[in-house]
Image (cartoon, rainbow, N blue to C red):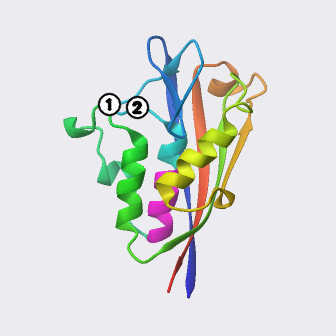
Amino acid sequence: MSVSTGIGWDSHRLAEGRPLILGGVTVEHDRGLDGHSDADVLTHAVIDALLGAAGLGDIGEHFPDTDQAYAGADSISLLRDVVALLGNREVLHVDTTLLMERPKLKPYKDTIRETLAGALGVTVDRVNIKASTGEGIGFVGREEGVAALAVATLSRP
């Protein structure tokens, strides 16, 4: 068995009139994330981490923002598509960090873990969600946007 690890990163601008979707879960907030798809930064970071661990490029290669087929796309569906691309690779663990000032994610963390684990086809204990603020620094701290980082570890027989 071989093991590989990949990292993923994404960020999106906060905008009025959009839902805030994180890890496939709609989070109560006065603004949402702006993007070509549903702008789910957390799921996008997980997708890139998986693609990186498998050596399959990046999210933009598979789901380009120039393709109208992905306009408003549900990122959890895209994640399921990526899991199918993994073939005989097994997701051992996914660890994530979400960077945003507010709202606090504690009430949503368990549901986000369950949603991501379901899309990944793994048990919840293989997915971890962390959150941090920007402490008033940078685009996150000024509440202009949200960023996410993910690390995925895969095994291959």
Q: Amino acid at mark 2?
A: Asp
At horizontal 65% and vertical 61% (from top left) the residue drawn is 126
Viewer-proximal residue among 23 and 135 = 23
Q: Residue at x 67, y 18 (%)?
A: 142
Q: Amino acid at mark 1?
A: Gly
Task: Assess whether residue 33 is covered by the magenta stretch.
Answer: no
Determine which of the numbered discs, if any, sits on residue 72 in the image.
Answer: 1
- Residue extending furthest right? 135
- Provide the major secondary structure of the magenta segment: helix
Q: Is residue 51 magenta?
A: yes
Q: Which residue is mark 2?
A: 38
Q: CA distance from mark 2 to mark 1?
A: 5 Å
SS class, disc 1: loop
Query: Could you tell me which residue is drawn at 65 percent across and 27 percent down?
Result: 140
Tell me residue 59's x, y (percent).
38, 51
Q: Can you give x and y, in whole percent of width and height, for residue 83 in the image?
A: 42, 61
Quadrant housing residue 137: top right
Above or below, comparing residue 3 to residue 130 in the picture:
below
Q: Quadrant of the N terminus?
A: bottom right
Looking at the image, which is closer to me, 112 or 95? Answer: 112
- The magenta segment: 46-54
Question: Sequence order check: which comes first, mark 2 or mark 1?
Answer: 2
